[in-house]
Amino acid sequence: MMKRIFLLLLCCGVFNTMMAQNGAFGPRVSLLSNELSVSDNVNNVSSGDAEFGYQFGVFARLGLGKSFMLMPEVLFSDTQATITSNNTRADLDFNQINVPVNFGIKILFLRVQAGPSFNFLTKAESDINGTIQDVKDNYKSATVGYQVGVGMDLLNFLALDLKYDGALSDINEGGAGGFSADQRQKMLVFAVGIKLISGKNKDK
């Protein structure tokens, strides 16, 4: 029992220390420009133009010294895409839980960041000529991607980030609506976070 209490206090102390060193926590919303790229031209399969989507959730920033930080997020996303084959068009709708874990370094007033992004599919539907089908089984339930980007704080309570989210592997499991091809989701993300909890900036 005493060991558990000691470990809990130790974890709380470490967390408080990390929060004090440029740490932050709060809600986050993002506007996405999403593209589903098709690498293999199988059966004349091609993807449409980029479409807008959104994310919302929470972010944290944990200081790892004066200039380094760990930045995990837990987000829900809604994205759309279009894929065609032999004049047959499928409008796709995806819901995911995204868990990016970026490592960052502060350079002047900017945060330069990069890291893995873990994605968990919760819904995938296709609309072909008005017929909506559940195609979740045609896509992998969990995938790993990557993020790179920059960010800055504004007015002491806003956390702004511009990030590119790329795919490390094919997300297709068996083809959407019979469309078998290497499909990879790519997103340009503009995110705004509100720092409900914020540590002191040691650079000041």
Image (spheres, grey):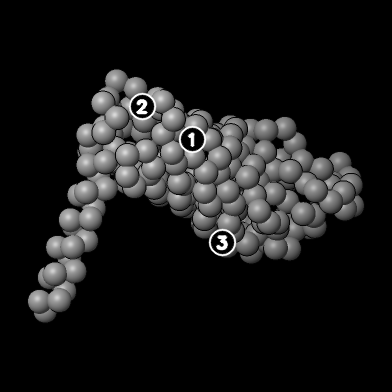
Residue at disc 2, secondary structure = strand
Residue at 59%, 58% in the rendered image: 143
The residues tagged by marks 3 and 2 sit, at their Cα atoms, a distance apart of 32 Å
Q: Check residue 170 in the rendering and tell me which mark sits there, or answer none.
A: none
Label 1 Cα crowd, 10 Å radius (few <14 / some 14-19 / many 20+): some
The residue indicated by pointer 2 is 153
Q: Determine which quarter of the picture holds residue 51.
A: top right
Residue 112: numbered disc: 1
Provide residue 96's location: percent of width, then percent of height: 51, 51
The location of residue 175, given as percent across then percent down, is 75, 58
On the image, the x and y values in percent for residue 11 come to 22, 61
Residue 142: assigned label: 3
Q: Residue furthest top?
A: 155
Among the two numbered marks 3 and 2 on one chain, the one whose residue lies closer to the N terminus: 3
Q: Residues within 10 Å of mark 2 (few under 14, many from 20)?
A: some
Residue type pointed to by label 2: Asp
Give the quadrant of the N terminus: bottom left
Quarter placement of the C terminus:
top left
Question: Which secondary structure, mark 3?
Answer: strand
- Compared across the picture, whether 191 is left or right of 34 comes to left
Say what amino acid the circle numbered 1 marks: Val
